[in-house]
Amino acid sequence: MTNQTAESDVRSNPLYSKVVAQINEEKLIKDLTSYQLNRIKQMEELADEVSSSADESVRKVLAENLQENPRSVLSRLILGLDGLKAGNTDAEDLIVDLMKDFQKTARWPIVEAIAERILKDNAEHRAALHSMVEAVERLRGKKEVRPYLEKLASMDEQNPDPDVARRYGMLILEDDADRAGHYLKQAAESYARLR
């Protein structure tokens, strides 16, 4: 098979064509504030297609795009989600970095959507839980962050994050004073160790 034949086979692949079209479309977007939630959802669907595909040419074109444009939302999202399923730490860095970029631009619905997607694959992903707490608090209020703070607090029993323990303790103070006291004590001890 010649290189031209291989290239035409790759280009006739509908998934490859979709990804290339998305890459070209992304080049027209100026900054992160231009992204809408529905566009991110479309990218997540495309990430599912890429993950279920054995075609490495799609991953290769995304990796090339990432090298040319390190801030590419499309490449970071798709490669990040794809690699997260495989346990790739570099991919995890891509997706966490993308979430942080959207946090900086206060795109909370998008941060929540990406964090939800990560938590769907890994329910104990700390960065996603922290991002989810911040996004949900800003979108729906402090009372709604309870399940995420509880998860973080229970994950950190041995070495608690003082801010998480304090916030969770204060949140449950009225409902369960004994348990709240436990978390507030943990927070105080952690703060004391940090000094």
Image (cartoon, rainbow, N blue to C red):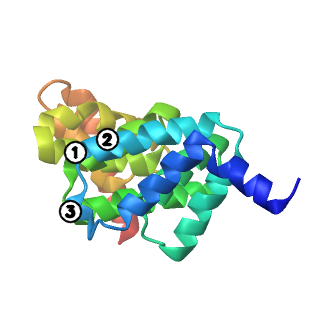
- Horizontal and vertical percent position of residue 17: 54, 48
Q: Mark 1 points at which residue?
A: 109
Along the line of sight, which residue is nearer the eye, 14 or 113?
A: 14
Who comes first in sequence, dot 2 or dot 3? 3
Q: Name the residue under label 3.
A: 33
Element marked by disc 3: helix
Q: For marks 2 and 3, give the one nearer the viewer.
A: 3
Q: Identify the residue shown where x is 24% and y is 33%.
A: 146
Q: Please tell me how crowded label 2 is: few (under 14), some (14-19), or many (20+) other residues with Cα within 10 Å.
A: some
- Report the amino acid beneath label 3: Thr
Question: Is 84 situated left or right of 33 in this image?
Answer: right
- Horizontal and vertical percent position of residue 182: 31, 37
Q: Distance between the residues labelled 2 and 3?
A: 15 Å
Q: In which quarter of the image is residue 33?
A: bottom left
Q: Please tell me how crowded label 1 is: few (under 14), some (14-19), or many (20+) other residues with Cα within 10 Å.
A: some
Q: How far apart are marks 2 and 1 (CA)?
A: 6 Å
- Report the amino acid beneath label 2: Ala
Can you say whether 159 is above or below 47 in the image? below
Residue 186 seen in render: no
Q: Are marks 2 and 1 in contact (CB under 8 Å)?
A: yes
Q: For marks 1 and 3, give the one nearer the viewer.
A: 3
Along the line of sight, which residue is nearer the eye, 93 or 33?
A: 33
Q: Name the residue under label 2.
A: 113
